Image (spheres, rainbow, N blue to C red):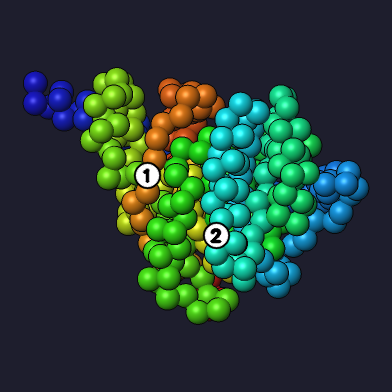
Amino acid sequence: MESLLADVVAALAALAAAALSLITIVAHVTATKMPNFHRHEEEKFFVNAEGKKESIPSIHDPPTKELSVVVPSYNEEDRLPLMMDEALDYLEKRQKRDPAFTYEVIVVDDGSKDQTAKVAMKYCKKYGSDKVRVLTLVKNRGKGGAVRMGVFSCRGGKILMADADGATKFADIEKVEEGLRNLQPWPNQMAIACGSRAHLEQDSIAQRSYFRTLLMYGFHFLVWFLCVKEIRDTQCGFKLFTREAASRTFSALHIERWAFDVELLYIAQRLKIPIAEVAVNWTEIDGSKLVPFWSWLQMGRDLLFIRLRYLTGAWRLETSKSN
């Protein structure tokens, strides 16, 4: 009996090793060597408040604003107004208190099928295209792809990514700014401050089903085991970057859908970019595009591929540039 059990264990181990080898080969062979930076012709311009086309600036240009806010939006005509009202109210009041403070908000319409772009353009017309810009993507890229296209179009010395649902209280930007300052980045140095909901985890567990709680813990384990060990909440959509940090990390990013945050932080850690995790106020908003089971399954696959593709050299990082 013991001999039979040993044979079964050996067979299962061999099968697991063969499966891992096959997955590794598939991950390596199917990997796209370079990230997708291609802009369609229509994405090289934005429409200003007067309805005229203007060229999109570049992340590689010197900054001309203190802050850029990138808002990825896919079919967000219902939720976007609340977020924009809160954000612009805060930003306008801050500018009145401190006239030297300058900002822009870039709404990235990620190939929406509803009136997201039209809703966003109302803010552009109200506040002017120097403060609010709408970047319309020809087709849906995914949240990571939308954020990257927005980041690459920024003029700010600091760049905040913020979800269109307004789940994070916008005034908490002051908390992530403080987290960034505590890292003491010099001009042109790299640093990232991540908003975090980790302190709210027990409350969220009480409101979730056992199945969703199991999925959450499974995802957190995979993130820790495969990719990012020092950040408890990789998925909060409220992250602040120095311009150089945003340029370096998003230029290396391959994943364009839900797991992009994990690869972004994995890249940052590989590049030895200082990262702060800062607790923020967060409220769950109805209307999420994330389908629990299938989205988590896709994210689990992406986490495994992130690890394997960097491990096998299918994806590489240029780490020689100094922070």
Up/down of 191 relative to 172, above or below:
below
x and y percentages locating residue 131 in the rendered image? 71, 54
Quadrant position of residue 169: top left
| Between 241 and 47, the one nearer to me in the picture | 47
Q: Which mark is residue 315?
A: none
Residue at image position (54%, 27%) is 289
| Between 207 and 313, the one nearer to me in the picture | 207
x and y percentages locating residue 159 in the rendered image? 58, 59
Q: Is residue 191 left or right of residue 58?
A: left
Which quadrant is home to the N terminus?
top left
x and y percentages locating residue 205 in the rendered image? 26, 29
Q: Which mark is residue 94?
A: 2
Residue at image position (23%, 35%) is 202
| Between 85 and 13, the one nearer to me in the picture | 85
Residue 253 in view = no
Which amino acid is tagged 2? Arg
Which amino acid is tagged 1? Asn
x and y percentages locating residue 3 in the rendered image? 12, 27
Q: Residues within 10 Å of mark 2 (few under 14, many from 20)?
A: some
- Tell me which numbered mark, 1 or 2, is placed earlier along the sequence: 2
For label 2, the SS is helix
Up/down of 9 relative to 312, above or below:
above
Gap in Å between the C-alphas at discs 1 and 2? 19 Å
Residue at image position (21%, 30%) is 9
Which numbered mark, 1 or 2, is in the foreground of this view? 2
Q: Which mark is residue 281?
A: 1
Quadrant position of residue 143: top right
